[in-house]
Amino acid sequence: GENVEQHPSTLSVQEGDSAVIKCTYSDSASNYFPWYKQELGKRPQLIIDIRSNVGEKKDQRIAVTLNKTAKHFSLHITETQPEDSAVYFCAASTTDKLIFGTGTRLQVFP
Amino acid sequence: GAGVSQSPSNKVTEKGKDVELRCDPISGHTALYWYRQRLGQGLEFLIYFQGNSAPDKSGLPSDRFSAERTGESVSTLTIQRTQQEDSAVYLCASSFFYRNTEAFFGQGTRLTVV
């Protein structure tokens, strides 16, 4: 079955700097890669997703890149703000269940 | 309702008792997932339902855990003979299967076994 690894587990950046979170997956059939943000005490919410027919997708300050050959994908947050502080989860899916990475706790210091 | 609804929000139970957690998915969503999230940890896959297909139970940690779903509606997760290590937030999510799109999460049930 699918296995998703995520790095780093914690990430601290200064406000205004960029943050990058990386994930690898094992099942080459996976074709959908969402990223979720979970603020303290709240439910995970989708922030961006990418499908296997696309190499990069951007939405304002966040972007995701996908390398299907290497089976890895990354989340990039530019111009970080304190409200970006949260736990971020990547996930991979075929037309089957959604498997999540272990999460990255991002702290943005003002 | 407009979103995924879970009940109860909080449950405190004594070790050894059985508990039942409920999830109401978004209407029309054929896929339903249960995850367990221990304090400060990630989203541990438990079970996946897709329409009337046999559920994927590969994530259930022991035979004390079971789940049911009737058609494309409500799902219940049952934990028998609860143990302290079962204490966690249990999250349910639903999505449109065939469109491979966003999974929407419920607010979770915080289970505390004392």
Image (cartoon, rainbow, N blue to C red):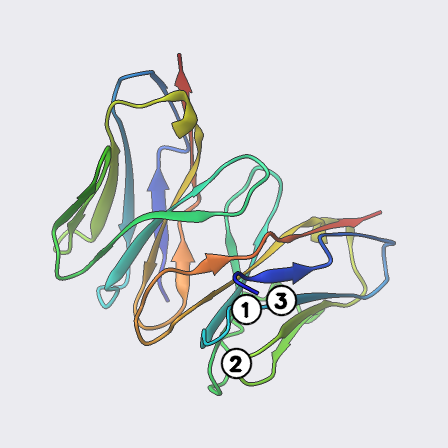
Q: Earlier in the sequence, mark 3 or mark 2?
A: 3
Q: Secondary structure at mark 2?
A: loop
Q: Residues within 10 Å of mark 3 (few under 14, many from 20)?
A: many
Mark 2 and mark 1 in contact (Cβ < 8 Å)? Answer: yes
Is A76 on the left-hand or right-hand side of A53?
Answer: right
Which residue: 39% across, 71% down? B96
Spatial separation of the CA atoms under disc 3 and disc 2: 11 Å
What's under tag 1, amino acid-wise? Pro
Q: Nearer the viewer, residue B24 or A22?
A: B24
Q: Which residue is mark 2?
A: B72
Spatial separation of the CA atoms under disc 1 and disc 3: 6 Å
Location of residue A89 in the rendering, given as x and y in whole percent from the top left corner: 40, 45
Q: Which quarter of the rendering shows the C terminus of chain A?
A: top left
What's under tag 2, amino acid-wise? Glu
Q: Which quarter of the rendering shows the N terminus of chain A?
A: bottom left
Which residue: 12% across, 51% down? A55
Q: Which residue is mark 1?
A: B25
Location of residue B55 in the rendering, given as x and y in whole percent from the top left corner: 51, 79
Instruction: Residue A27: give its label.
Output: none
Up the image or down, B70 lies above or below A6; here it is below
Mark 3 and mark 1 in contact (Cβ < 8 Å)? Answer: yes
Q: Which residue is mark 3?
A: B23
